[in-house]
Image (spheres, grey):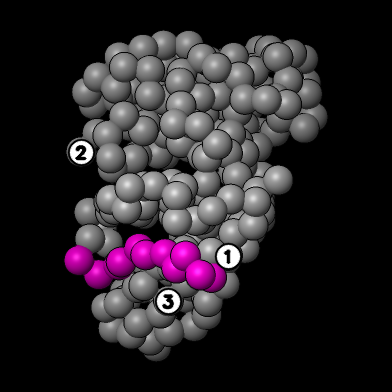
Amino acid sequence: EVQLVESGGGLIQPGGSLRLSCAASGLIVNSNYITWVRQAPGKGLEWVSVIYSDGKTYYADSVRGRFTISRDKSENTLYLQMSSLRAEDTAVYYCASRRSQLLPFDSWGQGTLVTVSS
Amino acid sequence: DVQMTQFPSTLSASVGDRVTITCRASQSISTWLAWCQQKPGTAPKLLIYKASNLESGVPSRFSGSGSGTEFTLTINSLQPDDFATYYCLQYNTYSYTFGQGTKLEIK
């Protein structure tokens, strides 16, 4: 069974940086597709970023150039490095994986809350 | 980027009703469309993938259809557990897009 556990959220000032982690068990992060999705308080879901098994990465326009997705083979952990944070980045951030290329995702973490405020 | 327009934004229905939610894509996405359900304070749950494929463990009262730019999620015989928010998601391109969501409320 795949389990994903996000961590690293918290309160950060505008313009600051934060790194989120997504620790995985039941799958090998380095050879799997994992995506980040966020949800601002009371709002809908927004896709943020994805890393494929071949290492290719893609980002939503709203975060491109400010967020970087990466992975650590030894820790079996995915990261989302966030910089130049804005109030509109305030959200619960989820990581998610999939068992098949036919799906966008099927396993999710519990989410970690990022609050950008002075 | 592909834009997804989902409607209605809110839907009031009763237990036992049949409801339909629609998503339209700004360009053809073939059948790379998923539907997920979210309840407050929890992560989304995948219901349908590739437009019409039921995810394992999801009740058969849920069904999806469509291709190209227009897609529907139908829930037959609504159960109390079905009152939640539903989102469509296109994953045809490398930049995914969610619909705005439909909140299904008890009438």
Look at discs 3 and 2 and give the one toward the viewer. Answer: 3
Q: Position of residue A108 (x, y in %)?
A: 59, 49
Q: Nearer the viewer, residue B102 or A74?
A: A74
Residues at badges 3 and 2 in contact (C-beta under 8 Å)?
Answer: no
Q: Amino acid at mark 1?
A: Ala
Disc ID at residue A72: none
Left or right of residue A35: residue B39:
right
Can residue B17 be seen here?
no
Quadrant of the image containing the N terminus of chain B: top left
Q: Which residues are magenta?
A: A65-75
Same chain assignment for discs 3 and 2: no
Magenta-colored stretch includes residue A72: yes
- Residue at the image point whose x is 47% and y is 72% from the top: A20
Q: Amino acid at mark 3?
A: Arg
Quadrant of the image containing the C terminus of chain B: top right
Badge 3 element: strand
Q: CA distance from mark 1 to mark 3?
A: 13 Å
Magenta-colored stretch includes residue B82: no
Instruction: Report which residue position mark 3 lands on.
Output: A19
Disc ID at residue A23: 1
**Taking B63 as reference, is A114 above or below it?**
below
